[in-house]
Amino acid sequence: MLDNEEDTFKIQKRRGLIVWVYSTKQIKNLRRYGFVHYVSSKMKYAVLYVNEEDTEKSIEKLNRLHFVRDVDISHRPEIDMNFGDKIGTEAAFQVQENSGEEE
């Protein structure tokens, strides 16, 4: 039924944007630019996820809004998250040799 490669599900690459606002009253307006993941009313920012290819256009549009103070890009996709080499394989995975056997 889903033999065609066009019909298969593909994970969309996303990028996180941190949108700093003057007031949290207009946070609902950010929903048209992407998925609002988190809102901090105390620090007045929102974490917004947008498609990777639309990142630059979204930043330009968000900066034009009168209630937006600043827009920062999340650099998490650029960071290598494989720490096995740095802390050692045994410490990273904590493998036990005799996990199922009783002595």
Image (cartoon, rainbow, N blue to C red):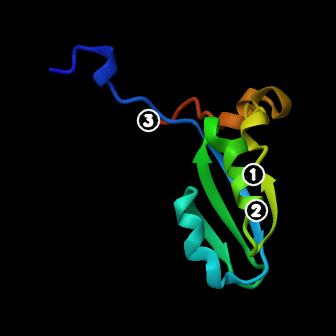
Q: Residue at x 78, y 35 (%)?
A: 78
**Mark 2 in CB contact with mark 1 (< 8 angstroms):** yes
Q: In the rendered view, would you say 3 is above or below 32?
A: above
Disc 2/disc 1 C-alpha distance (Å): 7 Å
Amino acid at pointer 2:
Arg
Question: Residue placed at 68% from the left, 82% from the top?
Answer: 24
Kindly identify which numbered label has been placed on residue 100.
3
What is the secondary structure assignment of the residue under circle 2?
helix
Q: Which of marks 1 and 3 is nearer the N terminus?
A: 1
Residue 1 occupies quadrant: top left
What type is the residue that disc 1 sits on?
A: Glu
Residue 51: where, in percent of width, then height? 58, 42
At label 3, which amino acid type do we have? Answer: Gly
**Mark drawn on residue 60:** 1
Q: Where is residue 50 in the image (x, y as percent from the top left)?
A: 60, 48
Q: How many marks are shown on the rendered structure?
A: 3
Closer to us: mark 1 or mark 3? 1
> For this rendering, which residue is in front, 103 or 28?
28
Residue at mark 2 to residue at mark 3: CA–CA distance:
60 Å
Name the residue at the left extreme. 1
On the image, the x and y values in percent for residue 25 come to 64, 85
Front-most of residues 87 and 90: 87
Which of the numbered marks, if any, corresponds to residue 99? none
Residue at figure coordinates x 60%, y 53% from the top left? 49
Labels 2 and 3: the sequence-earlier one: 2
Q: Do the residues labelled 1 and 3 touch (CB within 8 Å)?
A: no
Q: Name the residue under label 2.
A: 64
